[in-house]
Image (tube, rainbow, N blue to C red):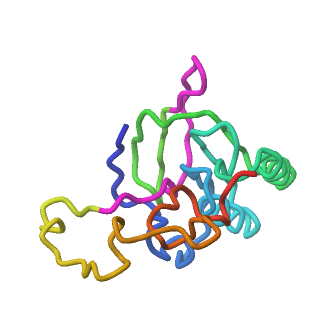
């Protein structure tokens, strides 16, 4: 589900760190690194913070024990965390008064706050710019059909066949 949010704090810029006032109650949508870091920073500065994550654990790309430790840390710092939750709708204007409709399991509820930080990641908007016509400079060894594993048979990052999350964010 896509939400259209205007005039909200955005994680795409440094707006959240460039505020001239302290949010009374910041509602963070997203349980990844950006939402966790900015939510915790604003809590430590004195804002009340609620974090809404669609995943069952915080930092869902990490091992479960890391997510559990983060959850405990946030609870110790009086940050309200709502895992496995979805935002169904938003009313109001961030910076004044906002009201969110949130679904957790089979129940729905309304949450009021003063500011929203949307930290759910980004998708590149490349539709219609002719990217498929761009010469991407496939030279010797750069096209997937020209690559081969090293002598030891291992595929390496950058050879085009290694897929998935960067090693920093790999579950073990």
List x then y, in percent, for residue 118. 48, 56
Residue at 55% in and 41% down? 112
Instruction: Residue 97: give x, y in percent of width and height.
Output: 48, 50
x%, y% of residue 135?
18, 78
Q: Quadrant of the N terminus?
A: top left
In the picture shown, does residue 7 fall above or below 109?
Answer: below
> Farthest residue toward the top?
106
Q: Position of residue 161 (x, y in %)?
A: 47, 61
Q: Which residues are magenta?
A: 102-124
Query: Which of the two residues, 76 or 134, is positioned nearer the viewer here?
Result: 134
| Frontmost residue, 132 versus 95 | 132
Q: Residue furthest front?
A: 151
The magenta stretch spans residue 118: yes
Tally of numbered tags: 0
Q: Residue at x 36, y 52 (%)?
A: 5
Examine the rendered structure and indicate whether residue 87 appears above or below residue 165: above
Would residue 3 appear left or right of 98 to someone viewing this image?
Answer: left
Write the residue at 18% across / 59% down: 127
Depth check, front residue: 167 or 93 = 167
Question: Image quarter for residue 109?
Answer: top right
Q: Quadrant of residue 83?
A: top right
Q: Based on the picture, tell me whether residue 92 belongs to the magenta stretch.
A: no
Classify 55 as above or below 9: above
Q: Main secondary structure of the magenta part?
A: strand
Residue visible at 54% across and 28% down? 103
Q: Nearer the viewer, residue 96 or 75?
A: 75
């Amino acid at each position: 589900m896509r939400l259209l949010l205007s005039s909200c704090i955005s994680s795409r810029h440094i707006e959240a760190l460039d505020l001239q006032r302290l949010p009374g109650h910041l509602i963070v949508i997203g349980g990844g690194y950006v939402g966790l870091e900015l939510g915790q920073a604003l809590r430590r500065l004195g804002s009340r913070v609620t974090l809404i994550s669609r995943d069952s654990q915080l930092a869902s790309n990490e091992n479960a024990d890391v997510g559990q430790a983060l959850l405990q840390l946030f609870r110790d710092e009086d940050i309200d965390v709502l895992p496995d939750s979805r935002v169904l709708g938003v009313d109001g204007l961030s910076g004044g008064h906002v009201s969110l409709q949130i679904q957790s399991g089979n129940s729905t509820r309304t949450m009021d706050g003063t500011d929203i930080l949307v930290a759910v990641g980004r998708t590149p908007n490349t539709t219609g710019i002719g990217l498929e016509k761009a010469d991407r400079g496939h030279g010797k060894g750069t096209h997937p059909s020209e690559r081969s594993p090293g002598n030891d048979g291992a595929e390496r990052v950058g050879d085009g066949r290694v897929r998935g999350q960067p090693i920093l964010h790999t579950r073990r």
